[in-house]
Amino acid sequence: MAKSKPQHGHQNGKRPGVKSAAVTPVRRHGGRKVISFEDKQDAGSHDSDSEIVDHISKQEIQTRAMRLLKVRESLPVFQNKEKIMAHIKANPVTVLIGETGSGKSTQIPQFLMDEIMSIHKGAIAVTQPRRVAAINLATRVAQEHGCRLGHEVGYSVRFDNKSHKTRTKLKYLTDGMLIRELMLDRNLSNYKCIIIDEAHERTILTDLILGFLKELQTTKRKDLKVIVMSATLQADLFSKFFSNAPILFVEGRKFTVDRFYLPRPCEDIVDSVVRCAIQLNSSETTGDVLCFLPGQEEIDKAVAILNKVVPYLDESVPRVVAYPLYAALPPKEQAKVFDPVKGFKRKIVLATNIAETSVTIPGVKYVVDCGLRKVKVWRHQLGLATLLTVPVSKASVSQRAGRAGRESAGKCFRLFTESDYQQLPKQSESEITRCEITSPILMLKQYGVQDVVNWSWLEHPGKEAIVSGLKELYELGALNEQGRITEKGRKMALLPLAPHLSTVLINAHDTHVLPYVIDIVSCLTVENLVLNPLPEERDEVNERRRALCTLGSKHGDLIMLKELFDMYQALKSNVERQEWCKQLCVSQRGFKNVIKVREQLTGYMKRLYNQSEPQQTQGKSGLRKEDEEDANSQLLQPPDIPGVLKCFLYGFVKNTAIGMPDKSFRTTPTGEPISVHPSSMLFISGSSTGDDNSTGPCPAILYIEHVFTTKGYARSVSRIELAWLQEIASGVLKQSSR
């Protein structure tokens, strides 16, 4: 590998003093006041930690908090506490740029909480783009503050809430959960301060929140403090949006990081990452390895390869312990990456870009960067999402390399050429410019915004995207002809789902098939529930699935999900479930999440229709007794499958395709060719039609997702009848025939 110049924060490369901190003079920058705190203290790894709080005594909680106080005091942000707080008090909006690991995400909220608790008024919300960060940060801060998680410090993420309505004074929550609170309380009257953390990630919801806060602060809540925190230098954009709000720079110490490039591009990213990690394990004496890969599929594959290789490693090198890290992992699995390994071992963490800034993993000295990430790009004209693996930006590459220099000098191995690096864009494009914005528009309408085109967008998504979203919501019945939100639209906005799935649940309620449909929707909301088998095992696993899921084999993937879920619940022991999941290549932790989501969605629907929730009792299997009985009875009773699938047709009326005489499919209304994805129950090798001898050719199909890789694929596919289309979607059929 070719070596480039070291990346470091101190030109002499020397170890900075432990206690020293320098504050640079106030300077002018673009007509705005900019205050820079340059701190030479080690940033450490304490921006977040995901150790789960156990049921321990108050004395043990306080003892741990006192021990962690020494760690807190060493952080750059803590050393500049008085100056930062004085600035926040003096300004309605503060834009703060701080290195990951500087302590901004854990310390600044605590400074503010101490201030608020002293006057007994209001609470603080800290938004995170990822649930893993919200949970980990809340856990860490509760430990530092000396309280139980869910009391003074808590979190709220989709389908998981650990906070108290009145007791919690500091709440970490995902962007979506704050927007949900905003829909219920437009003044956010419970909060004294809102902190938007990781603003540089520029998710759709982050941009939406910033717009809401700007409007709220200038009209009804002039007392509301807003702090926008970012780990990268995108300060100008945020500052200008909030009328030239002042910017603070907090710089933590960065050790020297040597960067290495490949002489030529690699062909197999997973293989190259694994080889590099194993080579590092053999050649380097101390320090853990953090590897960046595009997505879960690549990470799981790399972990499997490493686990197979470990037994054959020479005894003279450290034992490898491989950990995956991606958003879909449950908190307990994510927590493992933060624990130090004991003995003669080395930790190798394989992560998505979640490890760029959202979490800081202690012990990392080496970074292996494939330079890629996965993104979905929405094509408004075609109405489909293209799943792409694309190069990251220079800003992301820099963030990734910096993870190797948090505790000591480190090394970063970039699995691309230096020439490729020079071609990377400076910043990644924001989500709002490449994704479907139907959900954000519905939120705006629920909030009372009529002129969506001219709303206060941080970055305008474009008129075409807005018009497309408005039209989609009208067709779903969420908006009327004047563009105003309907009663159905208000119900849809209150459900924690995309508008299409909300439509499905509302129609399921109206047609009395809600319990069955909720199970399927719950399965759809959990990522990677049904896994992709290894190539050599694919045929065997698919045959097992078809043999067990007889209804799914005939009707498609949605019914298959329900059958799998019922079978999982009917198994009594954990050992049985583990073996069953292994045989069918499905995720046991995924099904555990499905149970939680189902319970949450059931509660949402009952509250939406003002129904009382029955008292919950637990059965022998560990499920709620009602769920256990429901699972056993539904295995015996044939469902109203046409009624169930029609509910999905109401929500995904445009996601349909008609079978052609040549056994191909063409979408409605565009007439584009589309193929059934190989992962579908309706896929037959050598054919894209999904037909078999028992059911005959599919006259039409319904699909939940349309993705384009090498060609257009339908995913989560179900067989439907043309008569259903004529009944529910005659307008779409007329349009497709033109």
Image: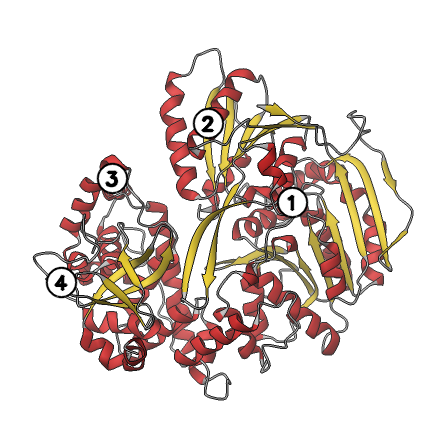
The mark tally for this picture is: 4
Residue 164 at least partly seen: no
Residue indicated by mark 3:
579
For marks 1 and 4, give the CA distance. Answer: 51 Å
Residue 299 horizontal side relative to residue 407, left or right: left
User: Given the image, on which type of amino acid does mark 4 rest?
Assistant: Pro
User: Given the image, on which type of amino acid does mark 2 rest?
Assistant: Val
> Which of the labelled discs sits on residue 395, or is there none?
1
Q: Earlier in the sequence, mark 3 or mark 4?
A: 3
In the rendered image, the vertical position of residue 274 relative to residue 616, given as above or below: above
> Which of the labelled discs sits on residue 321, or is there none?
2
In the rendered image, the vertical position of residue 122 relative to residue 97, given as above or below: below
Task: Please provide percent x and percent y for residue 2.
Answer: 60, 24
Q: Earlier in the sequence, mark 1 or mark 4?
A: 1
Of 535 and 490, nearer the camera is 535
Residue indicated by mark 4:
697
In the rendered image, the vertical position of residue 258 relative to residue 137, given as above or below: above
Residue 334 horizontal side relative to residue 242, left or right: left
Which quadrant of the rendered structure holds the N terminus?
top right
For marks 2 and 3, give the CA distance. Answer: 24 Å
Is disc 1 in contact with disc 4, using a CB cutoff of under 8 Å? no
For marks 3 and 1, give the CA distance. Answer: 44 Å
For marks 1 and 2, give the CA distance. Answer: 29 Å
Give the structural element (helix, strand or loop) at label 4. Answer: loop
For marks 3 and 4, give the CA distance. Answer: 35 Å
Is disc 1 in contact with disc 2, using a CB cutoff of under 8 Å? no
In the rendered image, the vertical position of residue 289 relative to residue 136, given as above or below: above
